[in-house]
């Protein structure tokens, strides 16, 4: 059975770095909401605030890939119950298991310095500043999830943690 890894966490905690390294390690599809939202902004539609459009677009692409037999890594902030439910529904409709991963940077000073040092790697995408990140709504999780802390562990260890959890999912499917 395929796995949808749903990453969540505030901007600057290391989600995309983790997602890229994990996708390479486990040979999964990496879907990044920032890329889709920037494309929507740069399109002829000029959608500047994507609202739910980016999430719905990558959820649809995720489902397509899950049904083709690929594991998928959804790289989003995933800050509220509605978005978390979207990923659970996407996994179910894609005949996949969901692995929720909350990526945190528990060292606030380190998180702030990461946010301040970030530069966009996507044309048309503006990275949020520290005030925007600090003010962002991020509801506490109610569901089970794996928590990885990028201020305590190097990215390689965080990748290994998630990959081990994916392996444990696969071993229970046999």
Image: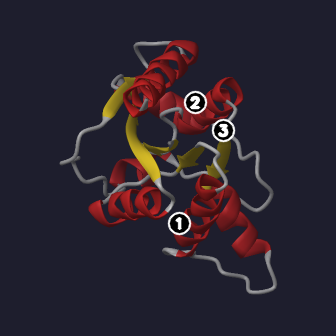
Q: Label 3 near label 1: C-beta < 8 Å?
A: no
Circle 1 sits on which residue?
55
Q: Is residue 126 visible?
A: no
Up the image or down, 160 lies above or below 135; here it is above
Viewer-closest of 172 and 97: 172
Q: Is residue 87 visible?
A: yes
Q: Secondary structure at mark 3?
A: loop
Q: Position of residue 169 (x, y in %)?
A: 41, 30
Whichever of callouts 1 and 2 sits on the residue coming sooner in the sequence is: 2
Q: Position of residue 46 (x, y in %)?
A: 73, 82
Q: Residue at x 31, y 59 (%)?
A: 80
Viewer-closest of 106 and 86: 86
Q: Secondary structure at mark 2?
A: helix
Viewer-closest of 163 and 44: 163
Whichever of callouts 2 and 3 sits on the residue coming sooner in the sequence is: 2
Circle 2 sits on which residue?
18
Q: Is residue 3 left or right of residue 48?
A: left
Q: Residue at x 55, y 47 (%)?
A: 75
């Amino acid at each position: 059975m395929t796995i949808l890894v749903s990453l969540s966490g505030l901007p600057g905690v290391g989600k995309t770095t983790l997602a890229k390294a994990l996708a390479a390690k486990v040979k999964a599809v990496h879907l990044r909401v920032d890329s889709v939202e920037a494309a929507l902004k740069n399109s002829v539609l000029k959608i500047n605030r994507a609202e739910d459009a980016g999430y719905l677009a990558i959820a649809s692409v995720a489902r397509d890939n899950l049904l083709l037999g690929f594991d998928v890594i959804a790289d989003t902030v995933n800050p509220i119950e509605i978005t978390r439910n979207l990923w659970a529904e996407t996994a179910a409709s894609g005949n996949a298991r969901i692995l929720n991963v909350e990526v945190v940077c528990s060292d606030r000073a380190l998180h702030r310095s990461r946010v301040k040092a970030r530069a966009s790697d996507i044309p048309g995408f503006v990275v949020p500043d520290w005030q925007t990140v600090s003010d962002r709504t991020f509801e506490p999780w109610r569901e089970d999830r794996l928590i990885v802390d990028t201020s305590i562990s190097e990215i390689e260890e965080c990748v290994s943690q998630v990959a081990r959890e994916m392996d444990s999912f696969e071993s229970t499917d046999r």
